[in-house]
Image (spheres, rainbow, N blue to C red):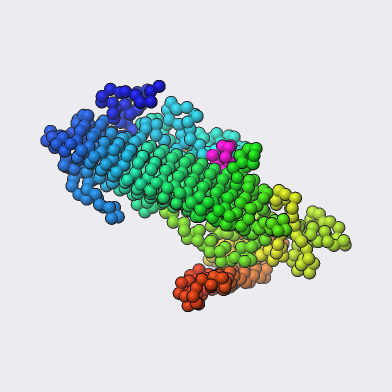
């Protein structure tokens, strides 16, 4: 087959849709007219004087009868351009378009236009090849090598067009390099959809139904045009092929954009900058992609950023995320992920969001010398520190912080809010549970606030739980407390000959007694974790008793705050009403579905409804997410009530117990306030930090004082309000 074929004259702009794929009784402009409907009589043929003027201005057309214009048409605005096929030009008169400090006259100059609809008052200059596009009003297109749409364009969707073989379908290989968790990308896909599809691989009927739903969500017929919506600016770019662009999008200096849907809006414009290459993807509103980034087979969520040479390959990056200078390969990353610095690498992972990766962190390895089929799963708040290296396969509980180290073996960390340290000198892994709560309260509280504050999405397709204390983390804390109880009892059994090695419930009761009563023997115990590292070396649990108490404080704080929220939502309610409204069996299994927490039985029902066809379209599934979110506050409050009864070890707390819990929660809030101040003050008291300043005055001028810190002030104000709220709740009885 010839690489370059010879066609007869007059072939340009004709037979866009192969004859065998034309809808019966329709012409090749059928879908174009559906995409860009025009009122009858909007367009007319050129007058002879207008043709004469166009020719005089060095324009050429293979058939002037197919160049249609409106009554508001100035032929002097078109110069040195060529037209092929049916071209319809909207209102065009002499004016200037301005975008930022860039001004250009309206019109079409030095361009080749093939079978396009062009909106009102556009500026198209130096577009060497513009074919099969619908251009909106007041668009600026200048200095572009090629803008072309194929008749089988899919605009980033993982569908097939008529006559296409299955082998060319575009999949995303998420969470695993082998493709064993592949999903079909589609316009409107959110992390919850990807998780359902990638995670439940044993549910074959579900997978088949999701594939069918996706294929049926889009017209599989050929002949749809690329679209550039109103007030877009595209300049100094090379190749755009099979791209659909939303309004007010700004593209400058892009190298290659192919098979994409780029969402944008007047209030959430998307921007794409210099040297960018994007292929086979979906981009959400409000995104910024700059400075040589590469993305191939990807979905980028709303209000997210790719910067400074970042590479996003076979990955889904959730809303409100920013990545720079790094490589993200074969991942499903939930919203609010940050990966800003050089040389970081994330591969074959599921990261549940609100995460941060430091410079030089390498999470996952491509191969174990046998097969590249390993995975990493990290809970919310995952934070691998500077130059951290972690190999497959690993699992991390929520808010796990990894100190700088090369971790030599696979890990399974069930203790949330922990600090991991690889003590190479002692050849042991050290884990400090509840580290964030004990030693870095400022970061913990601020991060929770920060993620919510930075959620600038105007159209929230899915709601996200940002609170660090929620049913998922609370259940992890409850499980972690049982582990600490057991491991503490086992540690005592190893050194005390009076105690036989405890097992089962006996072990749990003994550990709880030791941790609660501040047994002096705790100071001499070496508490060892089990099944946390695939190695023969010790895993040492540090600060076991303070962590245990911290976990308990976190549980009380969670329970009381959510019960207060219920009472505030019911102004006339009293304490005894809580039980009637919220009493239930504690839901222990929760699924983080794309950042939204859902009880596991509800996820099972969702899957069943998809399998049976009760939910037969993606909007139906998304509506179910929304319905479940509406139920979530009450479900969380029920979980909080059950948590409180568990802490108090009663079927139903008494009023004095409730007041005691309120007092304890108030004490915890004051502790939070104090620790936010103390943990931040460490930075001000650090003599090495002070060493970079000439004197104290310079430091204060540069940084301000700790008491001027805006977040410290905010937490103090919240604490004062908390005192007033507790007082009001106590008065209700």
Quadrant where the image shows the C terminus: bottom right
On screen, residue 240 above or below 8: below
Name the residue nearer the viewer: 527 or 503: 527
Residue 44 seen anywhere in this rendered image of the structure: no
- Direction from residue 329 to residue 285 in the image, left or right: left
Which image quadrant for residue 558?
Answer: bottom right
Q: Which residues are magenta?
A: 173-181
Query: At x 32% / y 39%, what residue is drawn?
Result: 145
Residue 482 image point, x, y percent: 72, 57
Q: Is residue 8 magenta?
A: no
- Residue farthest to the left? 49
Name the residue nearer the viewer: 488 or 200: 488
Query: At x 30% / y 31%, what residue is drawn?
Result: 29
Residue 401 image point, x, y percent: 61, 58
On screen, residue 466 above or below 620: below
Residue 467 image point, x, y percent: 55, 59
Query: At x 37% / y 31%, what residue is drawn?
Result: 151
Query: At x 63% / y 66%, what residue is drawn?
Result: 438
- Residue farthest to the right? 498
Residue 676 image point, x, y percent: 57, 69
On screen, residue 509 above or below 1: below
């Amino acid at each position: 087959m010839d690489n370059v074929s010879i066609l007869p004259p007059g072939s340009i702009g004709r037979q866009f849709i192969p004859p065998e794929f034309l809808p019966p009784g329709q012409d090749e402009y059928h879908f174009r007219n559906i995409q860009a409907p025009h009122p009858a009589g909007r367009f007319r043929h050129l007058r002879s004087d207008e043709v004469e003027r166009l020719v005089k201005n060095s324009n050429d057309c293979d058939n002037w009868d197919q160049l249609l214009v409106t009554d508001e048409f100035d032929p002097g605005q078109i110069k040195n351009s060529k037209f092929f096929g049916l071209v319809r030009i909207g209102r065009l008169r002499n004016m200037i378009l301005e975008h930022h400090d860039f001004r250009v006259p309206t019109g079409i100059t030095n361009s080749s236009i093939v079978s396009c609809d062009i909106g009102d008052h556009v500026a198209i200059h130096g577009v060497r090849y513009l074919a099969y596009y619908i251009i909106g009003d007041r668009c600026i297109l200048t200095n572009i090598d090629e803008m072309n749409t194929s008749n089988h364009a899919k605009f980033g969707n993982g569908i097939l067009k008529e006559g296409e073989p299955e082998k060319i379908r575009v999949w995303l290989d998420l969470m695993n390099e082998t493709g064993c968790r592949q999903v079909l990308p589609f316009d409107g896909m959110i992390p919850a959809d990807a998780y359902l599809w990638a995670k439940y691989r044993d549910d074959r009927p579900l997978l088949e139904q999701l594939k069918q739903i996706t294929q049926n969500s889009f017209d599989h017929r050929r002949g749809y045009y690329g679209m550039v919506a109103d007030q877009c600016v595209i300049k100094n770019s090379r190749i755009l092929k099979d791209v659909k662009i939303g309004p007010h999008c700004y593209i400058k200096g892009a190298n290659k954009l192919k098979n994409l849907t780029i969402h944008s809006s007047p209030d959430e414009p998307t921007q794409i900058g210099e040297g960018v290459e994007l292929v086979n993807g979906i981009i959400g509103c409000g995104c910024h992609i700059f400075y040589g980034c590469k993305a191939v087979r990807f979905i980028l969520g709303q209000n997210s950023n790719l910067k400074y040479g970042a590479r996003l390959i076979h990955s889904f990056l959730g809303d409100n995320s920013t990545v720079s200078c790094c490589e993200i390969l074969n991942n499903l990353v939930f919203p609010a992920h940050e990966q800003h610095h050089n040389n970081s690498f994330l591969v074959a992972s599921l990261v549940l969001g609100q995460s941060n990766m430091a410079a030089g962190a390498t999470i996952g390895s491509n191969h174990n010398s046998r097969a590249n089929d390993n995975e990493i799963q990290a809970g919310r708040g995952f934070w691998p520190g500077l130059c951290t290296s972690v190999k497959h396969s690993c699992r991390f509980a929520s808010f796990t912080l990894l100190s700088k180290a090369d971790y030599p073996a696979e890990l399974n960390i069930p203790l949330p809010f922990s600090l991991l340290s690889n003590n190479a000198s002692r050849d042991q892994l050290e884990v400090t549970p509840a580290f964030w709560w004990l030693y870095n309260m400022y970061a913990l509280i601020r991060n929770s606030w920060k993620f919510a504050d930075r959620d600038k999405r105007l159209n929230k397709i899915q709601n996200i739980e940002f609170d660090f204390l929620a049913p998922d983390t609370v259940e992890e804390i409850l499980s972690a407390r049982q582990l600490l109880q057991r491991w503490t009892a086992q540690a005592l059994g190893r050194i005390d000959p009076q105690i036989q090695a405890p097992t089962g419930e006996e072990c749990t009761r003994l550990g709880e007694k030791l941790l609660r009563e501040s047994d002096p023997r705790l100071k001499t115990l070496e508490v060892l974790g089990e099944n946390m590292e695939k190695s023969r070396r010790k895993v040492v649990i540090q600060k076991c008793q303070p962590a245990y108490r911290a976990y308990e404080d976190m549980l009380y704080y969670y329970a009381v705050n959510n019960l207060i929220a219920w009472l505030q939502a019911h102004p006339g309610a009293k304490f005894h009403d809580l039980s009637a409204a919220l009493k239930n069996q504690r839901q222990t299994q929760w699924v983080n579905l794309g950042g939204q927490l859902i009880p596991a039985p509800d996820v099972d029902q969702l899957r069943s409804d998809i399998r049976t066809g009760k939910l037969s379209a993606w909007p139906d599934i998304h509506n179910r997410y929304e319905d479940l979110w509406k139920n979530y506050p009450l479900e969380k409050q029920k979980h909080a009530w059950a948590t409180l009864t568990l802490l108090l070890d009663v079927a139903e707390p008494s009023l004095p117990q409730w007041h005691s819990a309120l007092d304890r929660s108030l004490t915890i809030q004051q502790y939070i306030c104090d620790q936010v101040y103390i943990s931040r003050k460490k930075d001000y008291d650090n003599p090495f930090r002070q060493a970079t300043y000439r004197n104290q005055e310079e430091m204060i001028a540069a940084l301000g004082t700790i008491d001027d810190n805006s977040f410290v002030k905010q937490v103090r104000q919240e604490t004062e309000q908390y005192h007033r709220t507790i007082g009001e709740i106590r008065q209700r009885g």
